[in-house]
Image: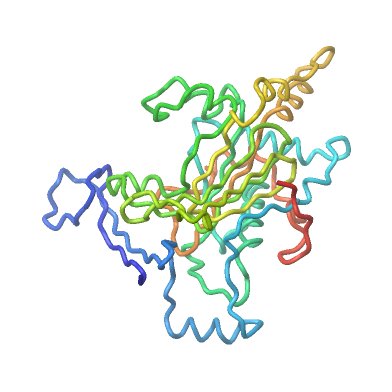
Amino acid sequence: PGPHVLASTIGAGNQSKSPKPNMSGEGGGQESMELSLRLDQDGRTAYEPSDEMVGIASSSASSPTQSSVDYSSKTILTKLANISTESSNLLDDLLFDAEIADCALLPRTFWMPAEGMTPRCRLEQMALEVFHRHVPKAGYTYDKSMSGAEWWVQIRPSPSAGRYSMLAGNTSSSGGMDDGMSKSGISFHWDKDEDLRLAMGGDLYIHPHLSTVTYLTDLGAPTIAMNYRVDPTTGACIEPSSDGKNSAGYISWPRRGKHLCFDGRLLHAAPGDLMKNGEFDRQCKFDATGIDDKKKHILQRRHRRVTFLVNLWLNFKPINVTLFPEGMIDKLSSQKDEQILFDERNGADSEGEN
């Protein structure tokens, strides 16, 4: 099948399945936005450059072979895997930053554009490193003005001011999330532009090209990515073929510094019930005898399941995802001169154990 081209006008708060432009100017002053996007035959956001841009890309390509994004599931070890907490404060600083970014009073996710902006903090720096690790810099054409990294953190058990602690008892805000999930795991879901899906009546699933997980601690449930997808324009489930050839899944157990990347269209989760009964509670315990409050808080952050999540969006920016608030940026660790996760864009890395 050929590519889909979608165009629509979305009114603020519009929940209809087929929102239409308001041509009359009526409707209670409701604001609207115009959306136009192209999906390729695989349901991914696509880019059709002008003839002039094609010529520029062809002349600047380093090889006659067109580069492409690798959508296979894989893990590698980052530089964080080799850092000792006794000789460096980097990991503890990142865990502190993660706790701030997880605050329930902040937006759920944040944006880092692919180009045109210098990272203001280490988490933005890491998000941009992840983007350029997986998106070829040469020989691959995409709309850089509409591409970037959507980043956020997940912490289990959630801190007292964390998003899932504050939402656990609020079923109207959490969609019925149970308290157990806020303490240990992450339920099965598809990464998508959630606000756009809701604005289009719940049936439009626009996915990132790639989803990634970087583990900042060794604790907790594994990440599972399974080859179950949804039709992007109807929301209907696409099950793997019955012959078993495409029914594979991928599982990654937490290891500090390990980086997991997989196709952004895949169903995934971090189910706590894959662990032995009581194991996660044991992992989270530490001896606080005779230590001051500062050291206790440091140990508490080290004894949680903490992940840094980055979704890579190409040729499309999620409609309501914005930069980390300027008024809070000074609370986070500042950018480092050297790369935090990867030595080089195409450097050799050690593969992480699943």
Residue 60 in percent (x, y) is at: 61, 83
Residue 74 image-quadrant placement:
bottom right
x then y, percent, for residue 101? 58, 37
Give the percent coordinates (x, y) of residue 242.
45, 53
x and y, in percent, of residue 157 in the image: 61, 26
324 or 152, nearer to the observer: 152
Image height check: is 276 above or below 262?
above
Q: Is residue 352 left or right of residue 159?
A: right
Residue lying farthest top? 289
Q: Nearer the viewer, residue 115 or 120?
A: 115
Indicate how the structure is coloured in the image. rainbow
What residue is at 43 percent from the left and 51 percent from the top? 239
Q: Residue at x 75, y 54 (%)?
A: 351
227 vs 282, left or right, is left
Q: Is 305 on the left-hand or right-hand side of 245? A: right
Lateral position of residue 83 relative to residue 14, left or right = right
**Residue found 58% across the figure and 87% down from its top:** 59
When asked about the image quadrant of residue 88, the answer is: top right
Count of marks overlaid on the render: 0
Height in image: 213 above or below 139?
A: above
Task: Name the residue located 58 percent from the left edge and 66 percent from the top edge.
Answer: 69
Residue 304 lies in quadrant: top right
Q: Quadrant of the N terminus?
A: bottom left
